Image: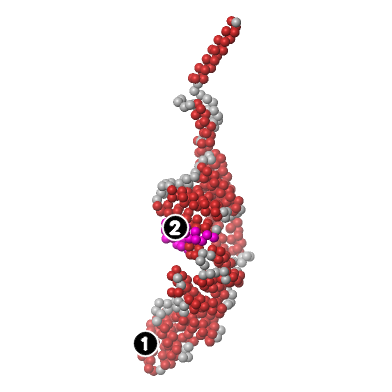
């Protein structure tokens, strides 16, 4: 009985000591970044436990943070270098297309060798940038700027190889960033750009719209983690214009011309400069072509690319087919004008080209029959028609086919274009055996004080002098005046 009482007392003493120790203890051993975390006084132990479980997801130790920042900075520098090389490569490619050199020429081999070297440098830099960005993110996953750099690396990579693969990688990164930062309008725009390059028009449109919504709903629109732009109305309009213009492009890609035009109207209202407004107006003009027939406008663009590849016969064939699908007469006129240019310059159908272009002019009568925004277009048709008739007339003169030359030059002289005096000058030469007709024509030529060069004025005066002499002695005084004018011009 005594032993039982002693054991009970011992248990009570141990329990009391344990309770006392528990109440006075102020330290717990919690593994966070392999360090012991103190239990601060005045904080409940349960709160401490919850906080410690979150710390490893919210904070990075200072050493890792410093190393991550250094890696990210180096990666950005390498990415910028890759972009500079890419700009140089694009210029090399553009310059090479202007050379039109043969496949086996030395210049072609040099261009090919330089392009290969530059392309390798770009890939090497992108691989290094990717590696540094990934390492930085592993050390510190929180900075959005680092993730943005990795996404930009993939965006640039997509321009040189495997576009779908790299745009998808960029898309995944932007989606991940938005999970952490839903108030960044620029992030939604970049996500839209990735979708756009992948031809996911609807998704791109939704993201562009979300970018606009966030931009307009916040007063700190330029206080962006991803933008160094100062907060002012001009910057806001610049962002807003980009977001609206991108929406219009997506709507056009899905053949919603009316909706695209509505968005473009808003874009013009916020355009931060005349240049940006002009960009929107040119796109608006493209959308309005053939009463908003986007399919036809796309086909026209494709044919223009064929012309750039010197596929002239195929281009004319497709233009003829396209013309039958158009409803707007002004669009039809444009296609006829383009066909005429190809026929005259490349397909040796010069008379047919002259006739085609003349029919446009005869059908419309004068520029006032065109809508105001197309008057300059009609004037271009008249000018090109005049040029064609002049050059064809000169070709007939070289062939000594003067009757044909007379007809084409006469038609060119009747058109209201800047060079009709050239046709008249040649007609005056052709009609030199009839001094009266020659004199009447040359008088019209000499009335043009703006376009005539000194050499052309000399020719005109000599023709007039010859005509006056043939007409008889009653023109002696005028003949002397013309002679003195010729002498003065010759001294110049």
Quarter of the image where the N terminus is located: top right
**Residue 78 part of the magenta segment:** no
Quarter of the image where the C terminus is located: bottom left
* Residue 98 shows up from this direction: no
The magenta stretch is 255-282
Give the residue pinned by disc 1.
481
Magenta-drawn stretch, dominant element (helix, strand or loop): helix
Query: Which residue reaches farthest right?
Result: 104
Query: Which residue reaches farthest top?
Result: 2
Q: Quadrant of residue 472?
A: bottom left
Query: Which residue reaches farthest bottom?
Result: 473
How many numbered callouts?
2
Q: In terms of depth relative to the viewer, which is nearer, 117 or 70?
A: 70
Secondary structure beneath dot 1 equals helix
Please tell me whether residue 481 is drawn above or below residue 96 in the rendered image: below
- What residue is drawn where x is 45% and y is 53%? 239
- Specify few, some or many for label 1: CA neighbours under 10 Å numbering under 14, 14-19, or 20 or more: few
- Specify few, some or many for label 2: CA neighbours under 10 Å numbering under 14, 14-19, or 20 or more: some
Give the residue pinned by disc 2.
266
Left or right for 449, reference 108: left
Secondary structure beneath dot 2 equals helix
Please tell me whether residue 355 is drawn above or below residue 177 in the rendered image: below
Q: In terms of depth relative to the viewer, which is nearer, 298 or 147?
A: 298
Q: Quadrant of residue 295?
A: bottom right
Mark 1 touches mark 2? (CB < 8 Å): no
Image location (x, y in percent) of residue 74: 52, 45
Please tell me whether residue 354 is drawn above or below residue 137 in the rendered image: below
Image location (x, y in percent) of residue 486: 40, 84
């Amino acid at each position: 009985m005594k032993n039982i009482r002693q054991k009970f007392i011992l248990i009570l003493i141990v329990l009391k000591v344990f309770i006392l120790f528990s109440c006075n203890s102020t330290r717990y051993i919690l593994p966070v970044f392999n360090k012991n975390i103190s239990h601060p006084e005045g904080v409940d132990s349960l709160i401490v436990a919850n906080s410690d479980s979150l710390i490893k997801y919210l904070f990075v130790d200072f050493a890792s943070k410093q190393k991550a920042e250094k890696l990210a900075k180096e990666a950005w520098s390498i990415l910028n270098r890759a972009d500079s090389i890419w700009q140089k490569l694009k210029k090399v490619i553009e310059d090479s297309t202007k050379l039109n050199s043969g496949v086996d020429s030395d210049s072609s081999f040099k261009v090919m060798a330089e392009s290969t070297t530059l392309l390798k440098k770009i890939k090497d830099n992108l691989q290094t940038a990717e590696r540094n960005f990934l390492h930085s993110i592993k050390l510190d996953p929180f900075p959005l700027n680092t993730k943005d750099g990795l996404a930009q690396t993939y965006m640039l990579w997509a321009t040189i190889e495997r576009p779908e693969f790299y745009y998808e990688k960029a898309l995944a990164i932007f989606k991940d960033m938005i999970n952490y930062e839903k108030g960044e309008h620029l992030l939604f725009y970049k996500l839209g750009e990735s979708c756009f390059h992948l031809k996911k028009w609807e998704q791109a449109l939704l993201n562009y719209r979300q970018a606009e919504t966030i931009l307009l709903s916040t007063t700190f629109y330029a206080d962006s983690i991803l933008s160094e732009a100062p907060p002012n109305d001009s910057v806001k309009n610049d962002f807003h214009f980009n977001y609206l213009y991108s929406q219009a492009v997506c709507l056009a890609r899905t053949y919603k011309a009316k909706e695209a035009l509505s968005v473009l109207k808003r874009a013009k209202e916020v355009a931060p400069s005349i240049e940006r407004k002009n960009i929107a107006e040119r796109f608006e003009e493209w959308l309005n072509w053939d009463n908003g027939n986007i399919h036809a406008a796309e086909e026209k663009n494709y044919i223009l690319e064929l012309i750039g590849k010197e596929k002239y016969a195929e281009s004319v064939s497709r233009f003829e087919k396209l013309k039958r699908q158009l409803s707007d007469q002004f669009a039809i006129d444009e296609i006829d004008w383009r066909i005429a240019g190809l026929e005259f310059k490349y397909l040796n159908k010069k008379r047919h080209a002259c006739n085609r272009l003349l029919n446009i002019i005869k059908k419309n009568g004068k520029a006032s029959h065109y809508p105001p925004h197309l008057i300059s277009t009609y004037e271009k048709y008249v000018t090109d028609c005049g040029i064609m008739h002049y050059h064809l007339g000169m070709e007939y003169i070289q062939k000594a086919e003067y009757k044909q030359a007379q007809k084409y030059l006469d038609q060119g002289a009747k058109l209201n274009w800047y060079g009709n005096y050239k046709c008249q000058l040649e007609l005056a030469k052709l009609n030199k055996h009839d001094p009266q007709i020659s004199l009447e024509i040359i008088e019209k030529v000499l009335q043009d004080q703006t376009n005539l060069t000194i050499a052309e004025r000399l020719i005109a005066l000599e023709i007039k002098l010859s005509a006056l002499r043939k007409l008889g002695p009653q023109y002696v005084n005028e003949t002397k005046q013309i002679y003195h004018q010729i002498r003065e011009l010759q001294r110049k």
